[in-house]
Image (cartoon, grey):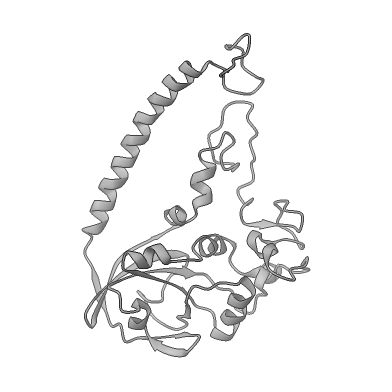
Amino acid sequence: MTTTPDNPTTALPGRPPVVDLATWQAARGELLVREKAHTREGDAIAAARRRLPMVEFDPRVEVVGADGPVPFRNLFQGRDELVVYKHMWYDGAPHQGQCEGCTVSAWHLKDAAYLNARGVSFAILTTGAWDEVASYIAFMGYTQPWYSVRGVAAPVGGDMGCFTSFLRDGDRAFLTYETTGRGTEPVSGCFALLDMTPYGRGEAWQDTPEGWPEGNNPCWYLRSDADGKAVWGPTSRPVPQWTRPGATPVQTLGRHDHH
């Protein structure tokens, strides 16, 4: 049974109006029209993305992984398609001083089973020296294949903090697509789910109803203290690092201490 307030038109302080179910369904229907248009435009953009020209490169260039140097073509694992995330790296920084934004992306894609089922391989590349990278992977508990591309030129190396797609055709390999910034958001499912909630992401830039909790904290998903409070200070670290066995409060932010 659905119940409604005695006066359904009375808005709560700083909140949208309270209405009956039928009125809500009508408003939801209007928004759905816009959502469907957004989906169709996304499909059209994806179609254009598939038609971008390609850049050929030498897949024999070597990268360094758990088994030592290997040619980049090995990352395809026999498949024709490969997606990589290029993880930023700060030399000499402790685990908690590594890139917070890259941690968000890497943490959300800990299993590539569904990519593999579609014939797509996945790996993480970074410019860190392998010994440092290996220690970080073990601490984070990552199981994806990681490789150091230190000293390797683009498109295998190059700018970090992005998703890059490659295509293999026999012994030939091609760069097909790359995106960075908010273009990396699709892999981080928490953002899409938060966009469905009343308070949203709680970031300073988002458009919220007047009187709504503003958040005004664009870094809540980057760092927290041991109690889960969003903070950027000497006892904080990238959010998922607190789930690691033996994690304790830290006394340094690594690279930030050098600023």
Q: Is residue 80 above or below residue 30?
A: below
Query: Is residue 69 found left or right of 92 in the rendered image?
Result: left
Q: Residue furthest front?
A: 1
Q: Is residue 224 visible?
A: yes
Q: Quadrant of the N terminus?
A: top right
- In depth, the one of 11 and 80 nearer the eye is 80
Q: Position of residue 25 (x, y in %)?
A: 44, 22
Q: Residue furthest top?
A: 7
Residue drawn at point x = 23 percent, y = 68 percent: 54
Residue drawn at point x = 32 percent, y = 45 percent: 42
Query: Is residue 71 found left or right of 216 in the rendered image?
Result: left
Residue drawn at point x = 62 percent, y = 57 percent: 222
Q: Is residue 255 visible?
A: no
Q: Position of residue 175 (x, y in %)?
A: 29, 70
Q: Is residue 225 above or below residue 25?
A: below
Q: Is residue 138 above or below residue 160?
A: below
Q: Position of residue 177 (x, y in %)?
A: 31, 63
Quadrant of residue 16 in the image?
top right
Q: Residue furthest bottom?
A: 68
Query: Is residue 1 found left or right of 29 in the rendered image?
Result: right
Quadrant of residue 39 in the image?
top left
Q: Is residue 176 above or below residue 79?
A: above
Query: Is residue 118 found left or right of 2 in the rendered image?
Result: left
Q: Position of residue 250 (x, y in %)?
A: 76, 68
